[in-house]
Image (tube, helix red, strand yellow):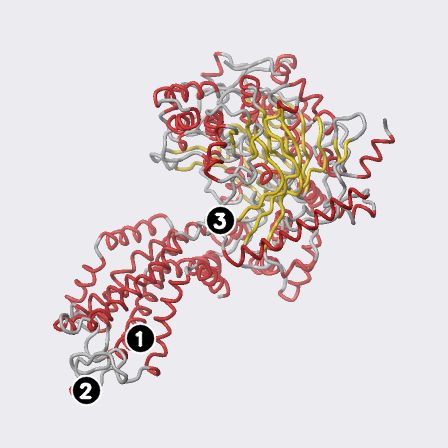
Amino acid sequence: MTPVLNVSNLTTRFKSRERNKWITAVDDVSIQIGAGEIVGLVGESGCGKSSLGRTIVGLERQQQGHVVLDGTDLASLSGRALRERRRAIQYIFQDPYASLSEWQTVGETLTESFVIAQKVSPDQYDARATRLLDQVGLPTQMKDRFPRELSGGQRQRVAIARALAVEPSVLICDEPVSALDLSIRAQVMNLFLDLRRDLGLGILFIAHDLALVRQAATRVNVMYLGRIVEEGTSEQVHRHARHPYTRALLASVPQADPRIAARKGFVTLAGEIPSPVNPPSGCRFHTRCPLVQDICTRVPPPVQGEGGHRFACHFRFADEVLDQIHQGYVHAG
Amino acid sequence: MKRILFSIGEAIGRFPKSALIGVGLVFLLGIVGPWIVPYDPSAQDLTARLTGPSAEHWLGTDHIGRDLLSRLVAAARTTVIAMTIVVTCKLVIGVTLGTFAGFAGGRVDEVIMRFVEVFMALPSLIIALAVIGILGTGYWNMVLALVLAFWSGSTRVARGVAIGVLNRPHMEALRVLGASPLRIYFRHLLPATLGMVLVYVSADAGAVALAIATLSFLGLGIQPPTPEWGQMLVDALPYLDSNPWLVILPGLALTGVVISFNLMGEAIALNRIPVELRGKPLKRSHLIAATWQTQTADDAEKNVKA
Amino acid sequence: MTTQNVVEVSDLSVDLLTKGGALRPVDRVSFAVGRGETLAVVGESGSGKTVMNFAPLGLMPVGVAVQISGSFRIGGVEIAGMAENRLRHIRGRSVGVIFQDPMSALNPLRRIGRQIAEVAERQRGLTTMQAERQAEDLLALVGMSDPAQRMKQYPHELSGGLRQRAMIASAIAGEPPLLIADEPTTALDVTIQAQILALLQSLQKKLNMGIVLITHDMGVVASMAHRVAVMYAGRIVEFGDVADVLVTPRHPYTLGLVNAIPREEDLSGSPFRGIPGLPPTMGAPVEACAFAPRCDVVMPVCRTRRPPLQALPQSSVLVACPVGIAQAGQRP
């Protein structure tokens, strides 16, 4: 299957506010998304997962690499042509309150999308808007409402409808449900599952909630300090993670079952994610890795693995060793 | 348009009443003044010079027998018109340049803002005096001088607001939708910025009013015979000892306008700090909550019986 | 056990009086927390879980008038309706407070060390020297490396996790017997969350504090709390030992929340479980079960009368649902 979106060797740098130093937020990252596939991207805040998504849709400028959409390298386009082509990738923001114009009704918001994309003739606007609202599970009356009259979940649905109005083939969702209430999250998550199935959308799902990503995504990428440290199917990454960071991340999620939680205690990964201004030498995770060895501090790790399950580590630790991270026996000094 | 009106309406709702009354009164007098004044403000009556308050002349007359009340009201009109022209000009310049700088970013932004900083660094009155010094006195020269003296502040505010608006996810969503820069600028950035900047800029209309009076006091602004408060002050100065009200009344009028606008400005600066609930709204809410108390008492009884 | 309670709340209602009218975010709740015990208060936004704990302490935004009825006792002292100047002594001395956003609680213009020392000075009458030393000890206690150096730093120089540690240090500087933590880890990454939760647990053991932990994360509840109060629309709908409530939820809302958590056995791509309908909005108290519109086992009585919170036989659990109680009776 050729992926609908093929991102290769993408690098994004920012100038940091302090002392004009360059920060490499995304460092030589490659990622593929197939049609009808949900790809998860997880990592701690500051790991560059949002920057990667924003670079793909052009909200940040890429320094190197290629974003190839349906066979077209977006770097070869510019101006109007680029805008029209890149429109096929849409972005769903975390904050459903700030991502809608407070001055436009839901109907006006959708109409503006139609006007921008010019794929629908004006006499079809109303019927199309009704269809879109129905598709995201909102009643037609919502057309005349302003965002301030809607709940968080409803706003997020409107944001999704606005993105769908330009008929995209890829959605990039940046923490789309973390601002929503627990009981509402499932409703919006199921909407994404439906859209993928009904419209064949490729979805890049950026989140810090591993459990959510595991259930939603078919493939999962784990990011640390601008690099992807492990990728594989949801099953491979969650049950057979090979990278110590993935293991530690999984183990840190508190279990909702008190019978398990009481036994497990807190598994802590010492320290915090280092500043991307001065990333650690060698393996970037070596400052926090419970299994760190001498070579990790000096040499960047190779990418190894097979069958679509790849990870960036010098070693291939046995399951028993990695399981210790899960059980909290190993603590970094 | 509705969004501009809405943000203005929202801002006005938060202003202290005293500021609203002061500003409202000045504008009202400025607009309907000519129709309600008892005398022609320029009509001289040398037989009735420097009379004190009387039934014919409520506030008395000045040194050449002009009706003081009529002159005060007419001067309000002069101030309101000149102030509105200056404020409108600096708003247009500020919003255009400011949003453009914020939208374009990079070099363009840097060049515009450096230029703004040069003007910010110079005291506004000095700029105004320099412009009049070069061009000479006259109504439109004064307006130009004041616009040049005041445009930089509103440009800076507009740029700040524009950058804030541009960074909102809503604007980013438009970029992702592939909206053209022209659409983003004219349909979204400009209206959103204009509404917010308008409120900020009108708040220092007080400073403009004061500058008009100052220039007129120095003989560089509004020229006689047009009545103007600053000019009335100069005219009245020789009679300070014998007829102090001739000085005090225009002074009070000017002070009132400046204070009203400053109060408004303060309310805008502080509008993020909510005010404590008091008076009638509090009582009304108390009454609503009180009905719940009796309800719950009934309910408790019901529960006991059940 | 009752004499050991650090906080006892009974029949507490909070009305917020605003320009637009009155709201009742907390409607007749009762609970107690003992020394060394953690009570988790779970609920969604607008459930009243934060107002319930903060309104009696006088920690409400300016612009809303608060009217409290019922009782909120900390260490036997009634603080419901207490004047602000006396509440100031309660906060910090009798109860420490941790907020979700440490930046809002720390003064950005003052050094970390000074801020913590100040609490110790004010609440425990220490001299400046003693308080500074105390602050340094506290920073070490909350797991900060190089506390002497950290003392001199400003809040913005610290990462989110370290700021949260600094706030915990200032919250426990007055050695309060009770700690109220409002979503202390929501803004943090999972690895940092684990560190902070572990810290709170070890501090609780050392200082024998009672903790009220306000959260929406069932994982945090299960790993931290002894007991849990589930709130919906300003009312406690289920209350009891965590091991009972999370394993066999009786209230349909609790059941929905527990079911909504993705499980290990859920396949990739399988639909998510949630609760249908919309979350409640704050307003006047309703004479019915607030959850009735979203409930799939709703009975006619639920729509006309507020179900009382009743104890289940031979269980630690109280539940406000006639269906939940009937089911518990069938399964002894």
Looking at marks 2 and 1 on the same chain, the residue that comes earlier in the sequence is marked by: 2
Towards the viewer: A8 or A167? A167
Looking at marks 3 and 2 on the same chain, the residue that comes earlier in the sequence is marked by: 2
Towards the viewer: C202 or B103? C202
Report helix, strand or loop for mark 2: loop
Residue A225, position as x, y percentages in the image: 49, 28
Q: Residues within 10 Å of mark 2 (few under 14, many from 20)?
A: some
Q: Residue furthest right?
A: C330
Q: Residue furthest left?
A: B238
Q: Residue at x 48, y 57 (%)?
A: B184
Task: Identify residue for label 2.
Answer: B45
Q: Quadrant of the N terminus of chain A?
A: top right
Q: Chain of mark 1?
A: B
Towards the viewer: C173 or B225? C173
Marks 1 and 2: in contact by CB < 8 Å?
A: no
Residue B305, position as x, y percentages in the image: 81, 44
- Spatial CA span between label 1 and label 3: 41 Å
Task: Identify residue for label 3.
Answer: B168
Q: Chain of mark 3?
A: B
